[in-house]
């Protein structure tokens, strides 16, 4: 059995060597003299946001929102309608003023009443709801109050991004 295997390998090696001598006759493709332009990418977040908005922008850290930065907040609190920049997707978005809430127990109506917010949606079975915090002066402080409630498992601020739009 070992002899047969060695013969096959040897035969393949010989035929491969015969074909290797023909390699010199293959023509190399001609090099093109056309220079292809390379798309210019912004190197910093400020440059990327300036390209998107058409103006210079100052970015503020928003550690509560992980990958988002506030755009031109000028030391003002984040409110509904504020512009934010996502550093991961490099897209601009608007704060909607809504907070999506997943409850561990209880009702979103009790939570909304205690925080003086309006309920825009609630699914009793899934314990998933949405609170409107659009009238709040500092929406991040409101988000923090919602997260501190013992009946809240998770809460996220809704941001409408302009992803998947043709450019």
Image (cartoon, grey):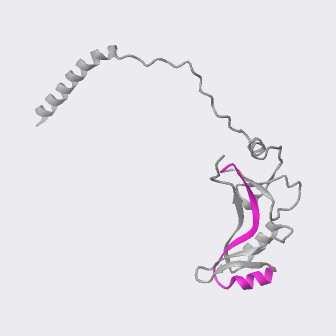
| Image position of 94 (left or right of 153) | right
Q: Position of residue 147 (x, y in %)?
A: 73, 73
- Foreground: 85 or 141? 85
Q: Is residue 88 above or below residue 150?
A: above
Does the magenta-highlighted stretch encompass residue 112? yes
Q: Position of residue 117 (x, y in %)?
A: 79, 78
The residue under the point 50% across, 18% down is: 31
Does the magenta-highlighted stretch encompass residue 147? no
Q: Is residue 81 above or below residue 102?
A: above
- Foreground: 164 or 117? 164
The residue under the point 84% across, 72% down is: 135
- Foreground: 71 or 37? 37
Q: Farthest front residue?
A: 166
| Image position of 101 (left or right of 133) | left
| Image position of 160 (left or right of 9) | right
Q: Is residue 112 above or below residue 88?
A: below
- Magenta segment boundaries in residue numbering: 89-115
Q: Splitting the image into 4 quarters, where does residue 145 fall?
A: bottom right
Q: Report the number of discs.
A: 0
Q: Farthest right residue?
A: 75
| Image position of 78 (left or right of 153) | right
The residue under the point 70% across, 55% down is: 67
Q: Splitting the image into 4 quarters, where does residue 99 fall?
A: bottom right
Q: Splitting the image into 4 quarters, where does residue 115 fall?
A: bottom right
The residue under the point 59% across, 27% down is: 36
Q: Is residue 165 above or below residue 44?
A: below
Quarter of the image with the N terminus is top left
């Amino acid at each position: 059995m070992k002899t047969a295997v060695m013969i096959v390998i040897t035969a393949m090696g010989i035929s491969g060597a015969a074909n290797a001598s023909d390699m010199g006759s293959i023509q190399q493709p001609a090099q093109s003299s056309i220079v292809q332009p390379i798309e210019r990418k912004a190197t910093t977040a400020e440059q990327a946001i300036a390209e998107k908005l058409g103006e210079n922008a100052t970015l503020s850290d928003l550690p509560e929102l992980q990958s988002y930065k506030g755009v031109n907040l000028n030391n003002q609190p984040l409110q509904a309608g504020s512009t934010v920049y996502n550093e991961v997707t490099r897209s601009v978005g608007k704060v909607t003023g809504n907070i999506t809430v997943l409850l561990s127990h209880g009702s979103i109506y009790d939570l909304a009443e205690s925080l003086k917010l309006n309920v825009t949606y609630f699914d009793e079975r899934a314990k998933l709801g949405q609170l409107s915090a659009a009238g709040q002066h500092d929406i991040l402080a409101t988000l923090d109050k919602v997260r501190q409630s013992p009946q809240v498992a998770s809460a996220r601020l809704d941001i409408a991004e302009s992803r998947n739009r043709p450019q």
